[in-house]
Each structure stands twice: as C-alpha cells, then as structure tokens.
Image (spheres, rainbow, N blue to C red):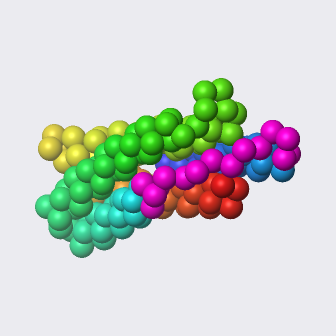
Amino acid sequence: MYWVGHIATLVSIFAIFAALIIAYLVRSTNPDQWRPIALPGQLWFSTALLAACSLAIEMARRALRLYSVHAYSVWLVRTAWLAGFFLVSQVLCWRIMAASIPAGDQNGGLFYILTGSHAVHILGGIAVLGYLLYRLARPWAIDVEVRREAITFMLATYWHFMLLIWLAIYGVFALRS
C-alpha cells in the first residue's frame, strides 16, 4: 500500500514540475515577452545543500539497515538541518532576486513559482523527517523495523527525486538566463 501512494506522489510531483518547466521554456521562446533573469550565485550553495540532504538521508537509510538506531537518528537530524538551511538559502535567493526583478515581471514570477513549489515539497519532506524522529522518541507497538525501513526508503527516494527536480529547474534557469 505504501508503494502505490509513494509512486503516485512522485508521478504527480513530476507532472506539476514538468508543466511549470514547459511553461517557462515556452515563454522563453518568445523574444517579445522574454527578458532573461540574472541568477544569484547563492543558487549554487542551495544546490550543494540539497545534494548534502540527499547524501544524509541515504546515510540514515544505511544506518537503519545496519541496525544502528543512534546513527540513524543522527543522520535524520542532519538531513532536517540541511533541509532547513536549504530553505533559508532559498529565501536569501528570493530576496536577492527581488532587488533585480521588476515588479510584475512574469519571467521572474515563474522563477518564484518554480522555486516556491519546490520549497513547499521540501517542507513536506521535513514533515516526514519530523514524524520519523518523533516515532523514534515515542515508539508505538506498530513501529516495527520493516515499517520504519519502508518509510525511510521512500523518504530517501523522495529526497533524491527532489534533488533531480531541483537540478532540472536550475538547469532550465541556467540555459535561459
């Protein structure tokens, strides 16, 4: 049951971002309406933070497979911190962009829609991290290892997927800026 929901979630997220990226690309082909936006260097730092999140959740997954609950919880906390830093980095990028994008610029608006949608999905991943950490602190009888491992595996694939989505978004921005 978990897998059906997980796959449906990833497919729907892919569809949302594919539609937004296509809209961005189509808009960028019209020279009358397109004004390239200057990307702040802060986005490289954001990308590194998200890659570190992906690595940290993978380390948590491996620790869980080795039955090291302490290492597992440490890596989950690190993932949460890195994700939080990613969101702070994004807010800093938005502030930098706000100074360089004129009010009402639709190209800049698409930048905010794409990165904001991504940030909302990162918040969803942080919520699941919080759930896993809460369950570690207050386990239930139903928190069997198989269930925890399944949720952790799905969360890891979610983070890897969000990294791929981010790389696609950033790649499109870099090509059209």
The answer to whether any part of residue 94 appears in the image is no
Q: How many marks?
A: 0
The C terminus appears in which quarter of the rendering?
bottom right
Image side of residue 9 versus residue 60, left or right: right
Q: Position of residue 33 (x, y in %)?
A: 81, 39
Name the residue nearer the viewer: 164 or 149: 164
Residues 22 and 90: in front is 90
Q: Is residue 29 magenta?
A: no
Where residue 175 sits in the image (x, y, percent)?
Answer: 68, 61
**Could you tell me if residue 102 is visible in this image?**
yes
Who's the residue at 46% across and 58% down the image? 41
Q: Residue at x 24, y 61 (%)?
A: 75
| Quarter where residue 93 is shown | top left
Out of 47 and 83, give the one closest to the viewer: 47
Residue located at (60% from left, 27% from top):
103
Residue drawn at the location 78% of the way across and 48% of the way down: 28
Left-right relation of 73 to 43? left
Magenta span: predominant SS is loop
Residue 121: percent from left, percent from top: 49, 42
Q: Residue 99: x percent and y percent? A: 49, 37
Region of the chain picked out in magenta, as a range: 30-44
* 32, 29: nearer the viewer: 32
User: Is residue 159 shown left or right of residue 147?
Assistant: right
